Image (tube, coloured by chain):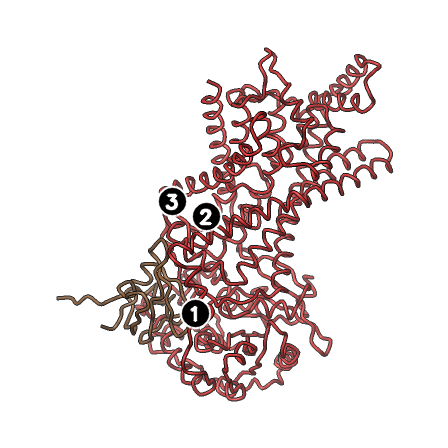
Chain colours: A red, B brown
Amino acid sequence: MKEARGKVPKIALIGNPNSGKSTVFNQLTGLRQKTGNFPGVTVEVKEGRLRFPSGAEALLIDLPGTYSLHPTSSDEKIVTTVLTNPKDDFYPDALVYVADVTHLEKHLLLFTQLLDLGLPMLMALNMADTAAEAGIKVNTGKLAERFGVPVVSISGRTGENIQKLLLDLEKLLNGDGHHRRSTSAFYPLREVEKQVADAAQLNVATGSPYHALLLAHHHAWLPFLQKQERETLAAIVQTKDFQSLRVQVDETLDRFDRFTPIVRQTVSQPSVEPTTFTDRIDTILTHRWFGPLIFFGVMLLVFMAIFFGYDITGGWVESGIGVMIDAIGVGLRENWFTDLLTKGVLPGLQGILVFVPQIALLFLLITILEEVGYMARAVFIFDKTMRRFGMNGRSIVALIGGGACAVPAIMGTRTISNWKERLITVMVTPFISCSARIPVYLVLIPVALPHSSWWTKSLVFGGMYFFGLLAALGAAYTFKKLLRTSDPSYLALELPVYRMPHWKNVWLTVWEKVKAFISGAGKIILYISVVLWILGNTGPSGALENAEAQVKATATAEMSQDSLDDLVAAKRLEASFAGMVGKSIEPLIAPLGYDWKIGIALLSSFAAREVFNGTMYTIYSLESVGRVEEEEAANQRPFERYSRLRRQMRDDTFRDGRPVYTLATGISLLVFYALAMQCMSTLAVVRRETGSWKWPLFQFFFMSGLAYLCAWVAFTVLSR
Amino acid sequence: MQRRYRTVPDLKQNESALTLAFTDPTLAGKLTAMGVLPGVRIELVRPAPFGEAYYVKVDGVRLALREEEAASILLEA
């Protein structure tokens, strides 16, 4: 891929947010796309392969949507970084500018900035179908003539004229398109800008004067500038008394003054704007009372869909992999490798796959809400609330996503421009009860409340979600008070018109999120499950063999082979390194009401929470039962599952005869699992998103410390 | 004596006015880039349910603005 990249021309897709850019990207590349990372920064880039009618190929890069080359968020900074650095890996050979033709006068600022940057460019007037319906007529020929670039009227939704776009684009790349722009800039620099640009051009190698001007404006943060270049530019700005912010605004206004008449001459719009469908819906959806009420209703529906979806599909995946494990177990000879495969790798894989259906479902629902245009309204409604807790209205999307899996949810925080707000969102999202906690809650709730009604148990289950949300908000509030920032914070958000979701976009987004989960979380869960297998299957020399021999020596004749095997497995685990560690931390966790068996389960859960159930089955000599019960779970009501395990847990006692699992221990465990940072994948993603190990380590100790404290309080209070 | 200009939060629901200027250069950069220019007609559609944000309309484009963003837009009398 790396070498091929040099030969294949690179094309960047660029435009304002809500220009329908991603729809066009999906039309052009389909499934031939992947998500990568901009080197050195934590912003993701989508790239895909594009095939011209001639058969030639090109690499299509989807740049984040932005209004201007003077950026305000980390997403938008990428665009300026890439386009002002010809040495950048993603620096394109040509640009495709996507503009919403129904609001063309609002979509040309960035376009004219790009004109002055001097890259070959093609304008795609998107949403031609909507424009036709609204009676908007565009003279594309005249538009092309006035701007000096090829203009194609397309529809990303219907696919109209996509082939023509490709034809024109190939011509543009080959230099024989009607790319006959005069060398004069669209926006002539003012005196002060000219002086600064000239000085910058003399000292730092640059292309057009506008390019030089951009470097001067943004020298403080542009990552590719050498230290010396940065200092030179800083000195230029200083000596010329260059008021960057004011100059930017003046430039913006001047550009609008220049292109607005062009739009008037080339686009004819029906003069009166009627009260539209969108306005009518918004009177309800952003209404004082109905707005928030409908939001909570929608969220309730989403979570019910997730929970019942998990109920059905989780069982399928469990039994599917169970069958596979059994088949492999039968087919292979019994040795350490088969054991590693069937007890380490495959259950690890199962741990990943079991969450795929619900993660897909949650992101399907979120993506639909986003595509329809509803999410922007939720952001608008909750901006104030989120800001009380040091976050941003946009954080609400991450917090909802955290209900499925924190990994893709945290990756979605990049649209938050303010570093502090984004960091807080990243730090508290893992408190939201994710799908990995569901199986643990389903075991622990009936253990803690064996005689309560189904209703009480369901209420506690719902309470766990509420508790997680409360913890997230509480932590966010604390961070808000502790962290300082000088970053500006914005809401300024376009509320798009409501429209039917474009299904191709929806499927591709869901596919992308699931892929992010599998590759982000999946790999780590897999590694950890192998490490855990090693810890659980090795011990001080001879210890495991001794334990096994002891079991076999004391075994009675009436024991079945299965229960003998299970007992051997339990004793081996107890004698292993994992067992030793579990026992050695017993004094540490005794104040929470836990014994060494729970210690082992806690240790293994630090990789991923859902490992809890599997470990408990092994410890209680129920390994073979566990496989059967996991498969049966699909046909049972939630709190009736895992009955043998629960019975075994209820019967367990400490060495002095007190039962291990009381109400106090059960609640203490629930609290611990709700709060503790027990997910390596999340930590890995946080490291990637924050750029250092500082924040994930802090998060780990903060969350786990809080979990310990709260579990201790719960145990102490309840065991009185 | 300094005259106090009206700003967007001073508008009544469904009232509109022409914009005049901005009070804050950083916010001005963001707002102008989004098409909120001096001299355009801005309509306050409704305040946010919990307050501190406004749903506005500029040239048929719908925007959500925070209190201080809305308050940085000076309006013609």
Q: Would residue A556 be found to the left or right of residue B65 on screen?
A: right
Residue type at the position of mark 1: Leu
Which dot marks residue A423? 2
Q: Chain of mark 1?
A: A
Q: Would residue A697 be found to the left or right of residue A527 on screen?
A: left
Crowding at dot 2, Cα within 10 Å, few <14 / some 14-19 / many 20+, comes out as many
Q: Does residue A434 appear anywhere in the picture?
A: yes
* Identity of the residue drawn at 79% across and 21% down: A564
Residue annotated with mark 1: A214
Residue A228 x/y as whole percent: 44, 61
- Is the Cβ of the residue at disc 2 closer than 8 Å to that at disc 3? no
Up-down relation of residue A457 to residue A423 (above or below):
above
Instruction: Give whichever of discs 1 and 3 has the lower sequence position.
Output: 1
Q: Nearer the viewer, residue A259 or A235?
A: A259
Q: Would residue A681 be found to the left or right of residue A115 on screen?
A: right
Residue A124 x/y as whole percent: 56, 77
Q: Chain of mark 3?
A: A
- Is the Cβ of the residue at disc 1 closer than 8 Å to that at disc 3? no
**Disc 2 from disc 1: Cα separation:** 28 Å
Residue annotated with mark 3: A480
* Identity of the residue drawn at 52% across and 27% down: A668
Q: Image quadrant for the N terminus of chain A?
A: bottom right
Q: Are marks 2 and 3 on the same chain?
A: yes
Q: Would residue A50 be found to the left or right of residue A304 on screen?
A: right
* Mark in front: 2 vs 1: 2
Q: Chain of mark 2?
A: A
**Disc 2 from disc 3: Cα separation:** 10 Å
Instruction: Give whichever of discs 2 and 3 has the lower sequence position.
Output: 2
* Identity of the residue drawn at 58% across and 57% down: A37
Q: Nearer the viewer, residue A595 or A575?
A: A595
